[in-house]
Image (cartoon, rainbow, N blue to C red):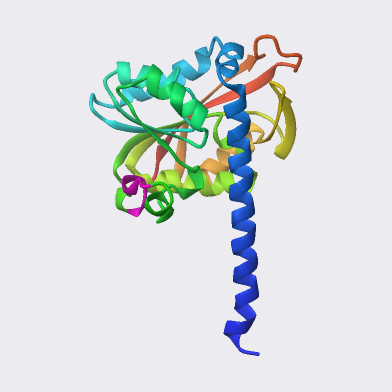
Amino acid sequence: MTDEQIAEPADAERASAGEGRRAERAGQAAAFDAMGAQYQEVFPARSGQFACAGWLLEQLPAGALVLDVGCGAGEPTARQLVDGGLRVIGVDLSAGMLAQARKAVPEAEFHRFDVVDLATEGAEQRWGVPELGPAGAGTLDGAAAFFSLLMLPRPEIAVALGRIRELLRPGGLLALGMVEADLDDAPLPFLDQQIRVSGYLREELTGLLERSGFAVEGVDSQSYAPAGSTLPPETQLYLRCRRTG
């Protein structure tokens, strides 16, 4: 048997697994489509997120280009950054959330997009956004990813961080929000939907960011319970990071 014949089944298996994961991410997005405006209602106050995005405004000049990864309905982050004079591109896999975002923040640019396609040929081939593919390497001044990466299994979080880094210029900034929890792709009931979430303890998360090519310049935490939820309060982590190298 030749090397090519040995490799073929493995390649097919990886492709099948990749498509399966893509379908799972699309299913997660559909859950957020079903939530609609409810999501905004249960997260009425997001002071930690607002403060972390404010760091981007403090650090970046007017007109700087920022990617809002998993932008959701566009508020508060895309709205805050646009009002602060930055150019914003928002990406999300939920068509319903994007519809809300385009109404809430018409000054920003929004695309339906799978985060794992950032900095890859899939940006253009799947989504028609070449500026977020290889051609966009080193073009972003900053990125925000508030509670969007936690929707991925841990291996995909590491991949997404690496691809966000590729799009950032040297010294570019990342404002990251995550829930502090020792979880990997765990099922969670939320707003009559079931989603799957991952998390890290803060030391693990800091280590992951450093291995992904970021210096962590600050970490803030906040206890938060979604309005009307029967779930116990969660510990939210807000990290201010800078691309190294």
Residue for point 38% across, 17% down: 80
Task: Give the vertical position of 3 relative to 133 (above or below).
Answer: below
Residue for point 65% across, 28% down: 180
The answer to whether any part of residue 2 appears in the image is: yes
Q: Residue 37, located in which quarter of the rendered image? A: top right
- x and y, in percent, of residue 212 in the image: 50, 47
Q: How many marks?
A: 0
- x and y, in percent, of residue 193 in the image: 70, 27
Q: Which residues are magenta?
A: 128-134
Task: Give the vertical position of 134 relative to 29 (above or below).
Answer: below
- Based on the picture, tell me whether residue 117 belongs to the magenta stretch: no
Q: Nearer the viewer, residue 102 or 179?
A: 102
- x and y, in percent, of residue 83 in the image: 31, 16
Q: Residue 227, located in which quarter of the rendered image? A: top right
- x and y, in percent, of residue 197 in the image: 67, 35
- Based on the picture, tell me whether residue 133 belongs to the magenta stretch: yes
Image quadrant containing the N terminus: bottom right
Horizontal side of residue 196 vs 122, given as left or right: right
Residue for point 60% across, 76% down: 8
Task: Give the vertical position of 35 relative to 230 (above or below).
Answer: below
Q: Nearer the viewer, residue 226 or 40?
A: 40
Task: Give the vertical position of 25 relative to 190 (above or below).
Answer: below
Q: Nearer the viewer, residue 103 or 133?
A: 103
Horizontal side of residue 71 vs 172, given as left or right: right
The answer to whether any part of residue 212 appears in the image is: no
